[in-house]
Image: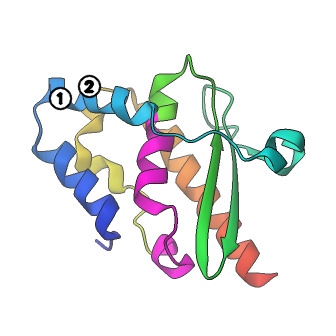
């Protein structure tokens, strides 16, 4: 499994933690999603909706100076999906495109999340990562 160091640390923390801590950590990660930059607030059409998520969830990616920048928008009252966004932001934002494309599509199963969130929510996380990778590939091809 190829994970960038920051994401690998997060996976290890979740994997080694008791179930209760994982729940608390998700709440913490839900608060780590930065607000959208003004250009995306003013032009929400630049965000792509991830329809597989139960909650309205939108994302954008940019490659700047050889690094992928991630932008997420999800309602504050949806802590689980925001936690997934926080995990991905903390672990992947600023990484080179090839590093992000190498992240296993199901890396989050190693975190023990299936014990605290529904399979439907986990499919949402998989869809978010897949959409990020698709957008990165498209930007590289452009």
Magenta-colored stretch includes residue 12? no
Relative to 93, does residue 46 appear above or below in the rendering?
A: above
Q: Locate residue 13, reporting x and y percent.
A: 18, 47
29 relative position to 68: left or right: left
Report which quarter residue 20 is drawn in: top left
Crowding at label 1, few (<14), some or many (≥20) Cα neighbours within 10 Å?
Answer: few
Q: Residue at x 70, y 66 (%)?
A: 62
Picture coordinates of residue 132 (x, y %)? Answer: 61, 59
Secondary structure category for the residue under label 2: helix
Q: Which residues are magenta?
A: 83-101
Whole-percent x, y for residue 7 in the image: 33, 59
Question: Pointer 2: residues within 10 angstroms few (<14), some, or many (20+)?
Answer: few
**Residue sticking out furthest to the top:** 77
Q: Residue furthest front?
A: 38
Position above or below: 36 against 117: below
Asked whether residue 120 is in view, the answer is no
- The C terminus sits in image quarter: bottom right
The secondary structure that most of the magenta stretch takes on is helix
> Dividing the picture into quarters, in which one does residue 133 lie?
bottom right
Q: Is residue 94 magenta?
A: yes
On screen, residue 120 above or below 69: above
Q: Are marks 1 and 2 in contact (CB under 8 Å)?
A: yes
**In the displayed structure image, the side of residue 16 where residue 70 appears, left or right:** right
The front one of 80 and 112 is 80
> Which one is nearer the viewer's eye here, 120 or 1?
1
Q: How many marks?
A: 2
Q: Residue shown at 70%/37% (left/top)?
A: 51
Q: For the N terminus, which image quadrant?
A: bottom left
Q: Which mark is residue 24?
A: 2
Q: Provide the residue designation for mark 1.
A: 21
| Residue at 40% across, 58% down | 91
- Real-space Cα separation, disc 1 to disc 2, in angstroms: 5 Å
């Amino acid at each position: 499994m190829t994970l960038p160091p920051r994401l690998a640390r997060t996976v290890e923390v979740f994997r080694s933690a008791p179930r209760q801590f994982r729940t608390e950590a998700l709440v913490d990660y839900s608060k780590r999603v930065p607000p959208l930059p003004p250009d995306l607030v003013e032009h929400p059409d630049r965000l792509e909706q991830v329809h597989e998520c139960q909650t309205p969830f939108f994302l954008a990616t940019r490659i700047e100076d050889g690094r992928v920048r991630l932008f997420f928008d999800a309602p504050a009252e949806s802590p689980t999906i925001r936690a997934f966004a926080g995990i991905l932001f903390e672990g992947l934002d600023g990484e080179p495109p090839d590093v992000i494309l190498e992240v296993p599509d199901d890396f989050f199963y190693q975190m023990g999340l299936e014990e605290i969130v529904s399979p439907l929510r986990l499919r949402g996380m998989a869809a978010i990562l897949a959409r990020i990778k698709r957008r990165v590939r498209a930007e590289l091809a452009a």
